[in-house]
């Protein structure tokens, strides 16, 4: 188990702290940001409780989602957060997710953060496979995954009862060898 610290050109991906609570709450309380997410809008108190609950978690524990801050290096402010979960039965397999603040979208942060996470998982941790499940209506995330080189593996039709209705999801994935080919 370890504390995670990933640096890209503009971002630091690190553990969430209570100092992030206000920035975290700004976008986690926005219905447009949470529209396709597995969580609903949060109150300021819920945001603080989430950060406190997450504080004891560290990268490396099989089967446990760990949420990380995505901080803009220049301003020292949160632009979003991401999550990584190692498979419960095989820690060479990971699942990821990302949320970018509505105030920070369309600036390339999502792609930069994802590439930083993939570099960490594939190049430093020797992960074999990374996947992401995305709402079938979330075109921005689907386009992001495709632009990075993820391939669609599955289409689950009305597989989740989500925010009062049945929703469909896609599964995207990338293997280490595909990552390596992308880099060459």
Image: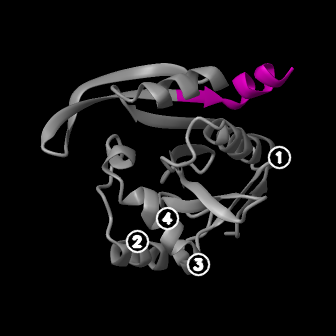
Q: Determine the residue located farthest toward the right in the rendered image.
A: 184
Residue pointed to by mark 2: 47
Say left or right for 68 vs 76: left
- Image quarter of residue 57: bottom right
Mark seen at residue 19? 3
Say left or right for 34 vs 165: right
Residue pointed to by mark 1: 9
Q: Tell me which numbered mark, 2 or 3, is placed earlier along the sequence.
A: 3
Residue pointed to by mark 4: 24
- At x 80%, y 42%, the residue is 123
Q: Tell me which numbered mark, 3 or 4, is placed earlier along the sequence.
A: 3
Residues marked 2 and 4 touching at CB (< 8 Å): yes
Vertical order, 73 against 161 (above or below): below
> Distance from label 3 to label 1 (Cα)?
23 Å
For the magenta stretch, what is the residue range? 173-184
Q: Nearer the viewer, residue 146 or 61?
A: 146
Assign the N terminus to one quadrant of the image: bottom right
């Amino acid at each position: 188990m370890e504390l995670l610290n990933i640096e890209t050109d503009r971002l630091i991906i690190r553990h969430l702290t209570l100092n992030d609570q206000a920035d975290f709450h700004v976008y986690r309380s926005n219905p447009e940001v949470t529209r396709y997410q597995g969580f609903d809008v949060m109150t300021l108190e819920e945001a603080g409780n989430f950060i406190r609950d997450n504080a004891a978690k560290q990268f490396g524990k099989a089967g446990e989602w760990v949420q990380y801050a995505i901080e803009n290096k220049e301003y020292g402010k949160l632009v979003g957060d991401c999550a990584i979960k190692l498979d419960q039965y095989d820690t060479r397999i990971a699942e990821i997710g990302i949320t970018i603040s509505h105030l920070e979208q369309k600036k390339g942060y999502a792609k930069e953060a994802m590439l930083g996470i993939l570099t960490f998982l594939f190049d430093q941790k020797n992960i074999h496979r990374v996947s992401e499940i995305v709402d079938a209506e979330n075109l921005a995330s689907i386009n992001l995954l495709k632009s990075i080189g993820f391939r669609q593996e599955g289409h689950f039709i009305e597989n989740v009862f989500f925010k009062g209705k049945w929703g469909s999801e896609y599964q995207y994935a990338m293997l280490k060898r595909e990552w390596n080919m992308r880099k060459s």
